Amino acid sequence: MIAPPDLPPPSAPRRPQTLDAHGAQRVDEYWWLRDRHDAEVVAYLTAENAYADAVLAPYAGLTDRLFEEIKARIQEDDVSVPARNGPWWYWTKTAEGEQYATYCRLADPQRSLEPRQALEAASRGEGEVVLDENALAEGHDFFSLGVFDLSLDHRLLAYALDTDGSEVFTLRFRDLDTGRDLDDVIEGVYYGSAWADGATFFYVRPDDAMRPHQVWRHRIGSPADDDVLVYEDPDERFFVSVGLTRSERFVVVQSESKMTSESHWIATASPEAAPNVVLGRRQGIEYDIDHAVLPGAGDVWLVRSNEPDADGTPSTNFALRTIPLDASQGEVLVEHRSEVMLESVDAFAHHLVLVERAEGLERLRILNLAADGERAEHLVEQPDPVYSLTGGVNPEWEARSYRFGYTSLITPVSTIDYDPLTGRRDVIKVQPVLGGYRPEEFRSERIWASAPDGTQVPISLVCRADQALDGTAPALLYGYGSYEITIDPVFSPSRLNLLERGVVFAIAHIRGGGEMGRRWYEEGRLAAKANTFTDFVACAEHLVAEGYAAPDRLAIRGGSAGGLLMGAVTNLRPDLFAAVVAEVPFVDVVTTMSDDSLPLTVTEWEEWGNPVADAEAYATMLAYSPYDNVVPADYPAMYVTAGLNDPRVSYWEPAKWVAKLRVADTGDRPILLRTEMGAGHQGPSGRYEAWRDEARVQTFLLVALDVPEGSEPLP
């Protein structure tokens, strides 16, 4: 139990603002907190930070210990596995005491090195520095790299940096022969880029609402004012991105909303040509493309799409077809499957890699383009029943192997090179975990909870191997459940702090995410959003019922849309949880979704609904919006975070929510708000600051859950 401090928590003045919609009125007593330039608002946020620090101050020794434990588990001087790209090997390295990564490369024009040899060379410090994030971050409290893109001849690097967390970047170009930046500087860019040749570069700009809506073309050596607008999407529902096919023959401009998408292409041989559309935009039809060269067919677009098949049957989980570059009709390569989601397709010169999801797990399917015999098409076998795949760096079109990462809740990430022809699996590197970590001391499981409508909801779980299922353990349940995003069971060195102290960790794979295919997503969005929250409550109840968690020692955690989840379930069942961590939570849903001047609002209407135009959508949101459903209750201990420069979830959402919770709370457990005053949605940017931040959260959890001593790992 967290002891209350001597000083009272900050109290935000209540200044009622009446909001009208669909013949009804809402009163927002903390509307005034929206003005980030108001000195009173800044003073209030500063006071909240001071209060949070005061509450946790008695446990500063625990925070320091947890931070040191995290640091002691991680190999601070480390290198990633180098990836071959043309005549070079590229990798990143980290050094003890440095917050950020350094990008390096090693020349191998004869292609004589194998991956392990390149890794050994990188570990010895060979090669040259391409970009040092630490040097770029000097003098800034926040730093983030948004673009890192090598020209096709490997002579220039385009990179873009953000120094305040706003996710608006400054783009620069570095001559890798001299190590000096060119005079070309472009302000106000977003994520996404593509080189067409050694001098032509495509980039993305956001509008005032932070919607990436334009693609521009820059010619190296020319003023930014001379850049050419290549593509603009005026529809406020659509995000625009740009990228290069692995074959390096086409620049692809993708425009997509939550329900509809459209692809355009430009040949890199003709970078000044106008974009060509692949398939015209049709509401509700989603597709993406990759360039492939297929035996007997030549150059084609691989089109992954949910377009209904010839007899009108929906392709909810997506099918794959081929379309010639100069046509709009093609052939089906992979049929739609009702129980298998086709998540993505990667094309190489000699094989295709399909990332699928079935029964909640990702899997890899290989289609060899020039192979004979039984391995022409096959699934890549994995050694464990519950696992997660992570992306690998695969830049080369002519690559004969495919690189991916493999991990689980108890298995550190392994970097694997897989040979599609022979099935040989070569583990190049296993993530080092220092301090004597022994995976056999823990066990991982997949269990299932029953939602109120009978739907079976998967839960991934990890705990000490000797954990008794007697209902006495402290537990932490994590959830997200939006945007079809999957929260897969991956290893975390920092999580060992909790596991070693006897905390059970679980992930609720609730509807609204993508764990069980497109149906899983559709059943947790718009009018069906309540399923996300009741699924999570069912998972929490199941952990208690099966003895994995003590009913009075169960904590929950989620961020962003997962923070919305935290707020909604806390309102539903404040009695079920002892502690809540809500990071940059999207909790003022109705207000944000009603204000089209805010960043991202219009694009989000297809995810949440439009409360301005649709009275039913308004009523649905109002029924679960955490800020609008705060009622008098004995609330759990709560740790809430915000970012003053956050373009995704405005800082005032968590600030208003905490102010309202304090007034309604009938208990004596602390409700804390901590705002990063110089950062955005992702929180602190440096790795040591991120570890320190995680140690603070773990301190809050361990003390709130009354873990014995709250300081030392259990024997």
Image (cartoon, helix red, strand yellow):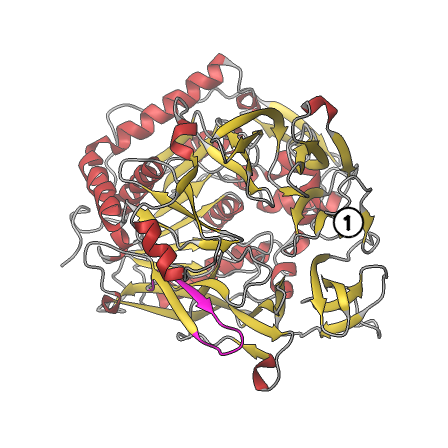
Instruction: From the viewer's perspective, tell me whether residue 23 is left or right of residue 111.
Output: right
Q: Is residue 692 above or below residue 181?
A: below
Give the residue at mark 1: 264
Main SS, magenta region, reads loop
Q: Is residue 637 above or below residue 481?
A: above
Instruction: Specify the amino acid type for callout 1.
Output: His
Give 18 or 184, whichever is nearer the viewer.
184
**Residue drawn at point x = 65 percent, y = 25 percent:** 18
* Residue extending farthest bottom: 373
Q: Can you give x and y, in whole percent of width and height, for residue 194 in the image?
A: 64, 43
Q: Can you give x and y, in whole percent of width and height, for residue 458 in the image?
A: 48, 67
**Residue drawn at point x = 41 percent, y = 48 percent:** 557
For label 1, the SS is strand
* Residue extending farthest front: 110
Q: Quadrant of the C terminus?
A: bottom left
Q: Which residues are magenta?
A: 411-424
Q: Is residue 310 visible?
A: yes
Give 672 or 464, whichever is nearer the viewer.
464
Image-quadrant location for residue 209: top right
Image-quadrant location for residue 459: bottom left
Give 237 or 448, whichever is nearer the viewer.
237
Q: Can you give x and y, in whole percent of width and height, for residue 356 in the image?
A: 58, 68
Q: Is residue 652 above or below residue 284?
A: above
